[in-house]
Amino acid sequence: MGKLKTIARRTFLIGSAAVVGGVAFGIYKVRQTAPNPLLDDLPQGATALTPYVRIDGQGVTLIAPRAEMGQGIHTTLAALVAEELDVAWDSIRVEHGPPGAAYYNRAAIEHNIPFADPDHGRAAEAMRGAMGVMAKLLPMQVTGGSSNVVDLFDRMRVAGAAARFALVAAAAQKLGLPAAQLKTDNGQVLAPDGRRLTYLELAPAAAAIELPANPPLKAREQWRYLGKSMPRVDMVAKCTGTATFGIDVRLPGMVFATVRMNQAMGAALLRFDATAAKAMRGVLKVVELPGGVAVVANNTWRAFQAAQAVQCDWAEPGYPASTTAMMEAIVASMTEKHRDSRLRDDGDVDKALAGGTVLEAEYRVPFLAHATMEPMNAVAWLHDGQLDIWAGVQNPTAARDLAAKAAGLDAAQVHVHVLLMGGGFGRRLESDYVVQAAQLALAMTGTPVKLTWRREEDMALDFYRPAAVARLRGTTTGKQAHALDVRVASLSPAESNLGRLGLPAFGPDTKIIEGAFDQPYGIANYRATAYRTPAGRPVSYARSVGNSYNGFFIESFIDELAAQAGDDPLSMRLALLTHEPSRKVLSAVASMSAWGQSMAAGRGRGVAFHLCRGVPVAQVVEITTTKESVKIDKVFVAVDVGAALDPRNLEAQVQSGVIFGLSAALYGEITFAKGAAEQSNFHDYPVLRMQQAPRIVVKVLESGGPIRGVGEIGVPPVAPALANAIFQATGKRIRELPLRKHIDFV
Amino acid sequence: MKLTVNGTSHAIDVEPEMPLLWVLRDELNLPGTKFGCGMAQCGACTVHVDGNAVRSCVTPVGSVSGAVTTVEGLGIPASLHAVQAAWIEYQVAQCGYCQSGQIMSAAALLQKNPTPTDADIDEAMSGNLCRCGAYPRIRAAIHDAGKRIRGA
């Protein structure tokens, strides 16, 4: 369809909207193709054929609409576009895209629906459709929930194929030949007579060509980049100190700042005295912020020192302020009044429990910090009526809108430049540090300000993974689980996060119970109930979110049921699983780990299975125990991702999830006094170190099912597999994380 | 005050107690060395002083008399150090934020011991945290870099 037709259709629909009101406009908004965000800011001589491809004098740049925070997404997204566009791998450059409606993430929003992933019934599909519409309208340009490849597998390939179509069509016009006679070869169009035209010279003419909506895509057998282990596009820079993270941005005349906030997050700063701080060397300004102060200086360390010299008088928080009070509030919310959802109720659980020997257990997990290696930071510069922001953000649209609000500007006056992230894990879905930088830019109008948090602020001002309590009951018949009743209570990360975005949290927060209600176990009587603890200390999403604790609850308790039934824990799970790809990964991990073969005295192994973001993952952990401590020797992992786009990166992501999950399982715990975290740095919030890292063997199965992301899936099964191994080796059942509260580790 | 970094001598006017890290990053605009914790807990800030790995975030610049080498001075994309080449071969980095420090610690280890055992690696690298959990590949890349150094 030509441009004229598009405009005509738009006019018609807006006309209709004037007659019938918001409904027609709503449909128009949903069907409308979002504008190409690259066109707003296109340098002279550059062409942006699609929102994902920019061609200029330097060559072809692929625009990644998602945040690179370690998961290798820039490389995989580049491979998706390059595969269809036909450009040489070593010529590719990748940049983060700006905030833009075109970059909305449908898949990240879709998986919040209250249906299990394998459920493709009418109600589930209708709800996914509605969520997709919401993602587009908001728009939500988020990186999270292992959603990137799910969301972009087709979109990026279509972008590459459509751009290639336009370049070939432009060459056909230039050469006076039918497009069908032309081929492409690594960034050039090739004529039958050997003439070659580069994409660069064709780009201006190609920009005038209408792009096809559904260009044909290569068959899998024709792939040359996808399905292969490609060298990461960011690897050389990251190994030579030349990669630019948010914290590395340097602008002429820039000044350096840090904050000192009420560590009881959200509570006020009552009064402060900055006299001493202002007299310190290099201090330029002390700025009062809501809930704290910032110091601007001519060096980051000087800002750090001066911020500590400010005398502050802090208000108490309006929520439970100690760990004990917070845990009591969670337990107290396990009542009908606070029931958030009951997303599974198979069979008759009450009747089944009344008719058998009931196994009953309570499990607990603590609050967790994200503790990314790169502390929160952002650069902001208010100049000439516009605000430029450079930062690592997982939600650039939200960062832009919230920064605009803080600076009293329209969103159109705010330009967010997204940088590489030294870890995200969900922390950078929040925009608090960007808002602070915007406030400082306003206070220092005309001067670029770099805000850097100390590690202590990063630990204290985190939106933690909420603590959770589970009460489980179950019965067994013969060698099989007959009933499972799981009740989970927690603060709602969705309510807390959406509140900060100014959005309502409608319906249940499936995050509280994800990983507990949706597991493909065919237990005849299976009920899962979530309770929402009234809002307290702000919390948010962390890698694998609810799965991070529900995996521990369910998979530990299944092990308890197996012990009660006198069955092998792996065999019992295999018999319960109703989902064929899940059975296959569990069988695969059994043979990888030689499950069932006897082990030397003092050694033990444990198994756990989890279905997370549609990916079945099974793990076996092997340990050695001594009188003093436990050593984790080896972790075997089998996963099924549908199709593996980059096997070597996939292995890295799974290993990453295992190590991240082990840090939480062994050590992770934030406790509170007077609303403030009692941990401040890596000495009292330890994470796994080299000498504790086990060997991790990963096997990837490709069932050919829907393509899936793997950023989170390594996390949920490792804590229960380890706890089950400890039980097997020592007879000690640990029902609380971190495990080190109950047993020592090497 | 004089400070030699990557073979270049700089005259700097800062408090002697300012950590070397912030002189490198903010005064000399060498951002390859990273800030992680500020208390020698994470190793992201590791640089060499006269070939020894030190945590620049707790090293007062006034106490530095030797030559400083940062990751920018170890090797550049067009001329990689053996450790960097091994890191790329094994595709070690994920988020990459800790890798400057990991690479500097590994280079210092291999300088003294080009045939490290796993236990040697554990000891030398235990001060460098990686939240992405790249440890298995870091270990493999150090063994490979040792081979490269021995072969060179």
Image (spheres, rainbow, N blue to C red):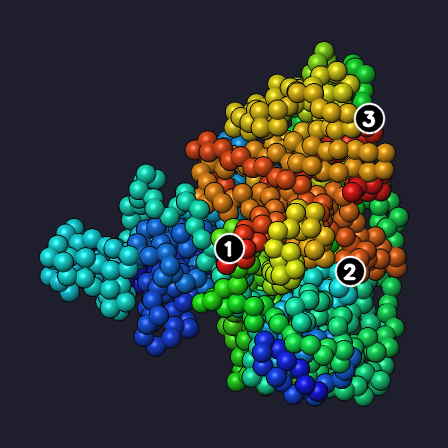
- Secondary structure found at label 1: helix
The chain containing the residue under callout 2 comes to A
- Secondary structure found at label 3: loop
The chain containing the residue under callout 3 comes to A
Q: Residue at the spot x=70%, y=29% of the render?
A: A606
Sequence-wise first label, 2 or 3: 2
As measured in the structure, the alpha-carbon distance from the residue carrying label 2 to the one carrying label 3 is 34 Å
The chain containing the residue under callout 1 comes to B
- In the rendered view, tell whether residue A482 sits above or below residue A276: above
Question: A711 or A116, which is in the foreground?
Answer: A711
Question: A635 or A470, which is in the foreground?
Answer: A635
- The residue that mark 1 highlights is B151
In this figure, what is the number of numbered marks?
3
- In the rendered view, tell whether residue A579 sits above or below residue A352: below
Q: What is the quadrant of residue A729 in the picture?
A: top right
Q: Amino acid at mark 1?
A: Gly
Q: Residue at the spot x=28%, y=45% of the render?
A: A216
Specify whether B125 is left or right of A166: right
- The residue that mark 3 highlights is A731
- Secondary structure found at label 2: loop
Label 3 Cα crowd, 10 Å radius (few <14 / some 14-19 / many 20+): few
Residue B50: x and y in percent read 67, 72
Question: A115 or A467, which is in the foreground?
Answer: A467
Q: Residue at the spot x=65%, y=60% of the render?
A: B112
Whether callout 2 and callout 3 share a subunit is answered yes
- The residue that mark 2 highlights is A681
Whether callout 3 and callout 1 share a subunit is answered no
Res A403 seen here: no
**Do the CB atoms of the residues marked 3 and 1 lie less than 8 Å apart?**
no
Q: Residue at the spot x=79%, y=49% of the render?
A: A669
Specify whether A88 is left or right of A731: left
